[in-house]
Amino acid sequence: MPELPEVEALRDFLTENLIGHEVVRVLPVAISVLKTYDPPVGAFEGNEITAVHRYGKFLDIEGNTGLHFVTHLARAGWLQWKDRLPDGPPRPGKGPLALRVALETGAGFDLTEAGTQKKLAVSIVHDPRDVPGVARLGPDPLSAGFDEDRFAALLKDERRQIKGALRDQSVIAGVGNAYSDEILHAAKMSPFKLAASLTPQETRSLYEALRTTLTDAVERSHGLAAGRLKAEKKSGLRVHGRAGEPCPVCGDTIREVSFSDSSLQYCPTCQTGGKPLADRRMSRLLK
């Protein structure tokens, strides 16, 4: 799933390539992608793009009429930029193409989604906060006002494990499965530690790991074309998706805990005092 760093890089890329250009066609291919119907998707045609914003994992393309094209790429969605779109309208079918946006220059982008779970979303709204997912977002962890005190206040009453709290978009916007693994590894913290049990020093370490991990990922992705962002994300991850490989910090084998629809990766030596965590599907979690 694209997370804050990749979506921020897409925002930069689209800012450079969209602003000042007119949208001439918005062509839905998969009807499931449209989450709003009033205004209709065709109302965004004719808009000149004035700005591109990011809200957590949401992209917001703003037009000069006051309409906003808001999209969430979900787990398997992506944005594919094309300097020259194919001639003729796309044909509905079983392929990954969900929606196409064409500019007056002949360039534009496709929104695609792999797999069978079609959760990629596009909304045409007058205000981004009209999108429920945007309205419920917590603070952006890279915003200027997101300091250690605010972070501590968000966690002090959280009775959940810290992995779940970091991923909750209503607590902190933009962090998903991959970067929560990376943040916890950098902080040398078990993903199963209760958020409310953190000491002031642990909170400080986690806050610093959060900001550093995300800032570094944004900097690595800055200036990359949309098509290169997935590879950059994968190459920059130190534990997520690397079960069975040696930890780049201590050399221990990276372990995995699997859930019904996801998994997490961690280093026992760095994060859990050398103790492997039990698989949640098989037994009670080790504290």
Image: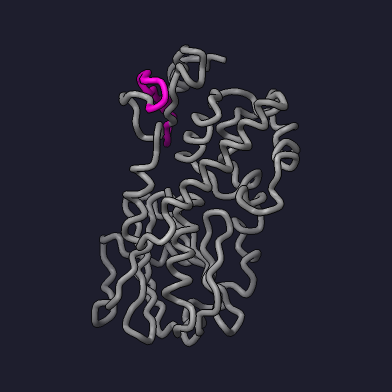
Q: Is the image coloured rainbow, by chain, by secondary structure, or in one colour?
A: one colour
**x and y, in percent, of residue 115 in the image:** 32, 50
Residue 253 picture quarter: top left
**x and y, in percent, of residue 286 in the image:** 53, 14
**x and y, in percent, of residue 8 in the image:** 50, 58
Establish if 32 lies above or below 103: above
Residue 258 picture quarter: top left
Which residue is drawn at the image coordinates 38% and 63% (left, top)? 79
Establish if 174 lies above or below 165: below
Q: Is residue 55 left or right of residue 244?
A: right
Which residue is drawn at the image coordinates 51% and 80% (left, top)? 49
Q: Magenta region: which residues? A: 248-263
Which residue is drawn at the image coordinates 48% and 46% (left, top)? 216
Please tell me which residue lies in front, 205 or 282: 205
Residue 269: in magenta span: no
Q: Is residue 100 left or right of residue 145?
A: left
